[in-house]
Image (cartoon, helix red, strand yellow):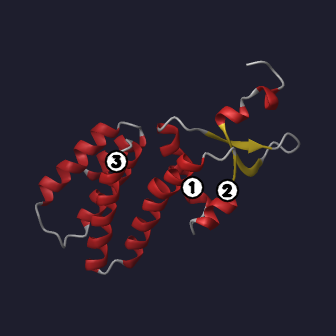
Amino acid sequence: MHQLGVIDQELGRLAQAEEKYQQCFIERGKMGWDHRRAYEHRRLGEVYALTNRNEQAYAEFGIALSISNECGHRNYATRVQENRIVYLDIPGTLENEMPEIIILAQLAMRFNTKISSLAPAFRVLWKRKIGYLPEISSKTGKPTGRAIRWDIAHSEKNTGMPQ
């Protein structure tokens, strides 16, 4: 059931994913020490973040972290903390600051995460109607390591065309 929830989540069917994760809790029962429950709590945290239910997301990530620590799974606890950062902390900061341009390396350093881990943060922002586009070099055709807010990238000053 968990993997079906993951598939739904990856396909953007968040309500169905949430239902499947909730079903996993029912099937697993109330055994708090069962580390597999941490997986459902972490995934629910992601779904709640993607659906702008931040308080619930923080709570789910907290439960997943607590279970992981109780079970001695330090690597998974680290993963849960990283998920909280990219699904909640980074989007919340960018939503409040609304920078026109983001230098991805600086953003990753600021939150002590890897550039490759930033994708979920931008998915959350996109769901909240705040989009960023990767800047592509006109000379090389490769990403520059910067992201530009969608409305700025498509403004008249950047395209040379009227809106």
Q: Residues within 10 Å of mark 3 (few under 14, many from 20)?
A: many
**Which label lies toward us, 1 or 3?**
3
Q: Position of residue 36 (x, y in %)?
A: 25, 65
Q: Residue under circle 3?
A: 48
**Secondary structure at numbered mark 2:** helix
Q: Residue at x 25, y 50 (%)?
A: 21
**Secondary structure at numbered mark 3:** helix
Numbered circle sitting on residue 104: 2
Q: In terms of sequence position, does the residue under pointer 1 or pointer 3 come before the other?
A: 3
Q: Above or below — where is 18 with respect to 43? A: above
Q: Residues within 10 Å of mark 1 (few under 14, many from 20)?
A: many
**CB under 8 Å between callouts 2 and 1?**
yes
Q: Position of residue 29 (x, y in %)?
A: 10, 60
Q: Residue under circle 1?
A: 118
Q: In terms of sequence position, does the residue under pointer 2 or pointer 1 come before the other?
A: 2
User: Quarter holding the C terminus?
Assistant: top right
Q: Quadrant of residue 154?
A: top right
Q: Above or below — where is 79 with respect to 72? A: above
Q: CA distance from mark 2 to mark 3?
A: 25 Å
**Secondary structure at numbered mark 1:** loop
20 or 50: nearer the viewer: 50
Q: Position of residue 79 (x, y in %)?
A: 43, 67
Q: Residue at x 17, y 48 (%)?
A: 23
- The amino acid marked with disc number 1 is Leu
Q: Quadrant of residue 31?
A: bottom left
Q: Residue at x 16, y 69 (%)?
A: 32
